[in-house]
Amino acid sequence: MGFISFDRSQKSLLGYSIDDFAKADKKGRFVIDIISRLNLKALFARYSDQGGDSYAPDMMLALWFYSYSNGITSTRELEDLCQFDTRYMYISCNKQPDHTTLSRFRKTHLDLLSEYFIQIILIAQEEGLSEFNHITIDGTKIQASSSARHSYKEDELDKKIESLRHDIAQYMNRCNFTEQGATDELDLETLRIEKERLAALEKKLLQRKNQLKDRKKKLKVENRDNHRINLLEPDARFMPKAEGLNYNAQAAVDTKSNLIVAAEVTDEPNDQGQFVPLQQKVEETITPDPKRSYTGDAGYHNLDELEYLEENKVDALIADPAPNNRSTKSKPTSPDTILKEQKKIERTDFVYHAQGDYYECPAGDKLVMVKDKGKTRVYRASKCPDCPLSPFCIASKKNFKQIHRSRREGLAERMAVKLNTRSAKQRMHERRTSVEPVFGNIKHNLRFRRFSLRGLQKVKGEFNLMAIGHNLNIIFKMIYADRLAVIIHLSQSRINQHIALSKNILLKIYMYFTNLFKISYPSPDYLVRIC
């Protein structure tokens, strides 16, 4: 098997070439240039030397990169564009692949997109578009391809399975009666096919039920009864603050260039535990730099993550979802301040002394450890009934103030101290103006609000494709803007050269006529201004 040949510069019978179609489309030429710089050996190796000729894989890859950079994800829409849009006709060399071929190519080679994503980032690094000093990490919910109406709770699945088994039993009886010579509106072969179809459906429902049970074990007890699973796409889930079935898409974005330097998709409903894996992917993608900094919002705040970042000396900032629960002061809040402002005493008003392992309250009482639960310790005060601040601290004077402290609470406290610095506040501001606009661009400008493919692995590949499309737009704009600036600079330099040359010519003419006729004429500078 070979590849269908193409030549964009070849003249047709009417005297034009496909290259003439897109002379104004600089981005199309840019995408083809990027494809030529990628290592596509793994892609070409997947094609056999047997069978008929196929479309060139580099052309197909360029077509998908270009379409996703323009927000086109539908195979049928892309098929129409290849027939009627000169830009896509130029990319596809006017070969006009149909939607089935386009879909098959995308599904077959999704696993290679992560490697091409990395290669494109490395090209951006080689071009010097950014030093990738500050990376911000965030996540967004993107709707799954399947509809939510195919989702069921465990008791609803039980009812469907019971109804299905009843139908299977009926078809089995009809098959038996037909074999014994009884008449039926369906022939024996059709009855057997239908029975096998129902049996396969029963097997699928039982598989989904087992998946649902395994997932419910990881949930809080109060959320287990209402948890549902989708029959067509079990990886997709209902997530907080999102409509319908969704996946959780993660992205690490460079604050200087807004390039996505790492992308991932998970079926977890929140961002807990996603910060470190994405940070590791960034270090694997681009040249490791110990001075590189990372920033994430409060959704990533997790003691396991903080411990890893501190042990590996990663310069990271993760916003605190509960800043009022951290004891970061060197001295407790004064009683006069509390009485004057009539403020409720928060945990931040206490001070933890690591050396003596106790808390100091605003009234000066010590909260000492009274119980060790393994992961947490309980500290209790002793003078609460006689304390004048007790109305602002505890519900009743009969009670004693207690504080629960994790054994790793120091990790969160040190992060809270770091977050209060001026540089940290600046970095958190950069996070809002870098990664969030990237998701806005993907969802609004590129209209990528729903995945076209089904299943977690395929969805990961498609999000890589979307990230590649976003990055190609960024790289194209940055490189094209730089080249335009150079052109403007060169043009201005040439203008200045012409002005200087004109001055010299006018000066010679001026001197010639002055010496010839001994008459004073206007100065050359005046003549230049008149011209």
Image (tube, grey):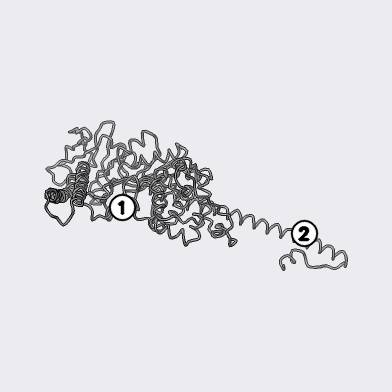
Residue 148 point in image, percent of width and height: 25, 55
Mark nearest the camera among 1 and 2 is 1
Q: Which mark is residue 58?
A: none
**Relative to the observer, which residue lies in front, 60 or 97?**
97
Give the SS element for disc 1: loop
Give the SS element for disc 2: helix
Q: Residue at x 64, y 57 (%)?
A: 491
Q: Amino acid at mark 2?
A: Asn
**Residue farthest top in this picture:** 355
Vertical side of 99 occupied by 133: above or below? above
**Relative to the observer, which residue lies in front, 400 or 149?**
149
Classify 10 Å Cα crowding around label 1: few (below 14), some (14-19), many (20 and above). many
**Residue farthest front in this picture:** 181
The residue that mark 2 highlights is 504
Residues at marks 1 and 2 touching, judged by CB atoms closer than 8 Å: no
State which tag comes first along the sequence, 1 or 2.
1
Classify 10 Å Cα crowding around label 2: few (below 14), some (14-19), many (20 and above). few
Viewed as shown, does residue 531 lie left or right of 376?
Answer: right
Asked if one can make out residue 343 in the rendered structure from this viewpoint, the answer is: yes
Work out which quarter of the rendered image holds the C terminus and state it: bottom right
Vertical side of 240 occupied by 405: above or below? above
Q: Amino acid at mark 1?
A: Ala
Viewed as shown, does residue 166 lie left or right of 323?
Answer: left
Residue 133 point in image, percent of width and height: 46, 43
The residue that mark 1 highlights is 144
Residue 277 point in image, percent of width and height: 36, 40
The span from disc 1 to disc 2 (Cα, nearest Å) is 71 Å
**Relative to the observer, which residue lies in front, 80 or 473?**
80
Asked if one can make out residue 155 in the rendered structure from this viewpoint, the answer is: no
